[in-house]
């Protein structure tokens, strides 16, 4: 089940350039992380329970670099937090939506991610994100 909108992903040429805009707006940067499996550097800016996630490509032949080349900087995806990524992926696939990966992949902060094809979601790239359980 989808729990909440976790973040809005925004593709930027560089984190420093992109972060300056969000800092000027008045948001505070939470931190940066290299997400090697996605070939992306990210920066998070909390806004209430949601975040703005800036995405910088780690190379020229990466999905985010290709996005920037064809569309320029801007909104890349919406990310929904889920409790069980396998169950939610299966449910959405049964509803006729295509998954971009055969199985969930490692994401930021120890999470696992899956993406839905934008042709099945009105042109919007949707990320599903399952975070590790908090220690008790």
Image: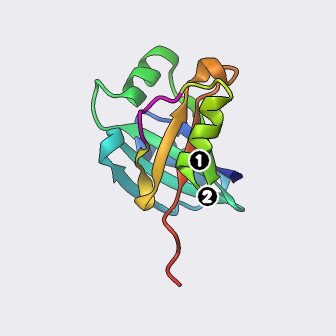
Span colored in magenta: 99-103
Above-or-below relation of 48 to 11: below
Q: Are marks 1 and 2 in contact (CB under 8 Å)?
A: yes
Q: Foreground: 102 or 72?
A: 102
Q: Is residue 27 above or below residue 120?
A: below
Residue depicted at x 53% and y 47% = 86
Residue 33 drawn in magenta: no
Residue at the spot of label 1: 87
Residue 97 in the image, given as x and y percentages of width and height? 62, 26
Residue placed farthest to the top in the image? 70
The disc at residue 83 is 2
Relative image position of residue 117 (x, y in whole percent): 56, 24
Is residue 100 a member of the stretch shown in magenta? yes
Main SS, magenta residues? loop
Whole-percent x, y for residue 52 in the image: 60, 49
Few, some or many residues within 10 Å of mark 1 (<14, 14–19, 20+): few
Q: Relative to residue 87, is residue 135 depicted above or below?
A: below
């Amino acid at each position: 089940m989808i729990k909440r909108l976790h973040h809005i992903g925004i593709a930027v040429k560089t984190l420093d350039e992109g972060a300056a805009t969000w800092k000027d707006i008045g948001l505070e940067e939470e931190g940066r992380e290299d997400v090697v499996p996605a070939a992306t550097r990210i920066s998070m800016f909390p806004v209430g329970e949601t975040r703005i996630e800036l995405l910088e490509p780690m190379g020229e032949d990466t999905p985010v670099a290709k996005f920037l080349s064809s569309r320029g900087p801007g909104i890349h995806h919406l990310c929904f937090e889920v409790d069980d990524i396998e169950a939610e992926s299966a449910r959405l696939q049964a509803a006729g939506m295509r998954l971009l990966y055969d199985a969930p992949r490692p994401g930021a902060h120890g999470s696992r991610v899956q993406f839905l094809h934008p042709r099945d979601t009105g042109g919007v790239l949707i990320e599903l994100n399952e975070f590790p359980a908090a220690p008790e």
